[in-house]
């Protein structure tokens, strides 16, 4: 098949959707399909390049400063329509790319597939944007879509009101187990380093982690907190909060190739989000043999039941509850041997279901169904 993947951002940009499209495209190319990724040009990346048999085309785009995923590529429907494609696939609820990609699919009479990675629940100006998005572009591209893929069943109730349930397919994210692996035993780490990994955005609840860390720091003075990711406009407020609580935090970015080593240096990873789909951070941390603490949003409760089994409650905490989170972190730091064993068992369970090869095979089957074919490599 000739597959066009369209996404608002792509490596070297860092993010869950970016990584998803990267790995999915790579696996599809391995299976003999022709894959082209169309995205925006950022971070000094070249206009076109390729990796592992996948072609990448980056166009200049203008964006809204307060919404990082809203990037407009001029004449995108026409650009896509003139490409040789059997199927169009776009990603991200809240991005403009699915709308414009669906128009290209409509023009060319080719199937359009959409993947929702998480369903935003916004307030204020963001809530107004969300309402407009849901009632204008989303109505169009969800109607044109042959199938809508969600990375977790937890998103089903949110999206079901906008698209018929029979159109929705759940295909979980994957993880590269050869890259993300526990090379340093948790119990042997000399420094207690806790980290948040992801975008610095208001809905991520990073303030809760900083408040929890202030409590942890009093009981374990040698502990450290790292915030690793891309700032979406709140980094300065996070620094002010930390300063007011009299704790030091380290804020930095990271390249994808650096992430395995970073996970291996951590005593715990925390995702204090107010909503999520199936965050790749969850999968990467668990694959790396590190305790993954999360709010019970998106796929986290179900995933934790699958991999942590009876220990799942030890890894979940309430949204905005920094007191509970502090207790969970301290429990990890004070019982590393116990958590090392639990994390080892969790990795083994994760390997049974969450791989990019499985995700690519299942996605290709969706393509084949949309094209009316019955077989797939």
Image (cartoon, rainbow, N blue to C red):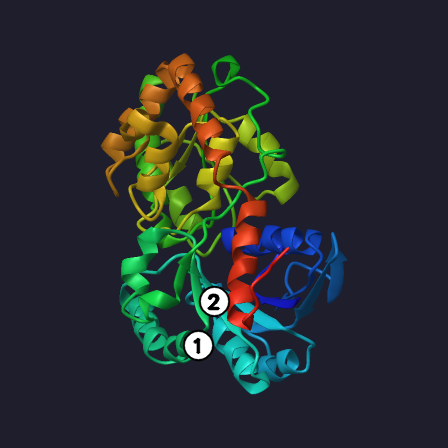
Q: Position of residue 113 (x, y in %)?
A: 50, 68
Q: Position of residue 88 (x, y in %)?
A: 57, 71
Label 1: which residue?
141
Residue 247: image x %, image y %?
38, 31
Q: Quadrant of residue 148?
A: bottom left
Pointer 1 local density, CA inside 10 Å: few below 14, some 14–19, many at least 20 = many
What is the C-alpha distance between the residues marked 1 and 2?
A: 8 Å
Q: Is residue 5 above or below residue 247?
A: below
Say whether residue 243 is left or right of residue 124: right
What residue do we see at 32% from left, 20% from top?
331
Residue 41, relative to residue 298: is it above or below? below
| Relative side of 92 to 322, left or right | right
The answer to whether residue 356 is above or below residue 40 is above
Q: Disc number at residue 114?
A: 2
Relative side of 138 to 174, left or right: left
Tag 1 near tag 2, CB within 8 Å: yes
Please indicate, yes or no, whether residue 147 appears anywhere in the rendered image.
Answer: yes
Q: Is residue 215 visible?
A: no
Residue sticking out furthest to the front = 374
**For the C terminus, which image quadrant?**
bottom right
The disc, 1 or 2, on the residue closer to the chain's N-terminal end is 2
- Which class describes the residues within 10 Å of circle 2: few (<14), some (14-19), or many (20+)? many
């Amino acid at each position: 098949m000739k597959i066009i993947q369209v996404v608002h951002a792509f490596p070297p940009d860092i993010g869950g959707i970016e990584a998803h499209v990267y790995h999915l495209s790579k696996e599809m190319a391995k299976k003999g399909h022709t894959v082209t990724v169309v995205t925006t040009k950022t971070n000094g990346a070249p206009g076109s390049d390729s990796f592992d048999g996948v072609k990448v085309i980056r166009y200049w785009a203008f964006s809204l400063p307060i919404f990082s995923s809203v990037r407009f590529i001029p004449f995108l429907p026409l650009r896509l329509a003139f490409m040789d494609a059997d199927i169009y696939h776009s990603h991200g609820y809240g991005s403009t790319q699915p709308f414009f990609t669906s128009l290209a699919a409509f023009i060319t009479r080719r199937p359009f597939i959409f993947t929702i990675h998480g369903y935003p629940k916004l307030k204020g100006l963001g809530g107004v944007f969300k309402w407009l998005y849901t009632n204008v572009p989303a109505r169009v591209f969800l109607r044109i879509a042959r199938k809508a893929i969600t990375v977790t069943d937890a998103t089903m109730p949110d999206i079901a009101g906008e698209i018929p349930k029979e159109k929705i397919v759940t295909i979980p994210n994957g993880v590269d187990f050869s890259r993300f692996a526990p090379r340093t035993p948790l119990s042997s780490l000399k420094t207690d380093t806790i980290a948040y990994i992801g975008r610095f955005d208001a809905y991520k609840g990073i303030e809760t982690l900083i408040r929890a860390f202030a409590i942890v720091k009093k009981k374990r003075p040698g502990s450290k907190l790292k915030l690793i990711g891309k700032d979406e406009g709140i980094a300065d407020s996070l620094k002010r909060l930390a300063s007011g609580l009299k704790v030091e935090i380290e804020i930095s970015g990271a390249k994808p190739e650096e992430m395995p080593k970073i996970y291996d240096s951590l005593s715990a990873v925390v995702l204090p989000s107010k909503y999520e789909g199936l965050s790749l951070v969850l999968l990467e941390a668990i694959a790396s043999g590190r305790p993954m603490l999360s709010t019970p949003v998106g796929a986290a409760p179900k995933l934790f039941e699958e991999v942590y089994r009876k220990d799942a409650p030890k890894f979940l905490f309430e949204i905005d509850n920094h007191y509970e989170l502090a207790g969970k972190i301290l429990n990890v730091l004070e019982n590393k041997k116990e958590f090392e064993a639990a994390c080892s068992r969790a990795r083994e369970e994760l390997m049974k279901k969450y791989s990019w090869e499985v995700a690519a095979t299942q996605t290709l089957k969706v393509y084949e169904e949309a094209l009316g074919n019955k077989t797939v490599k």
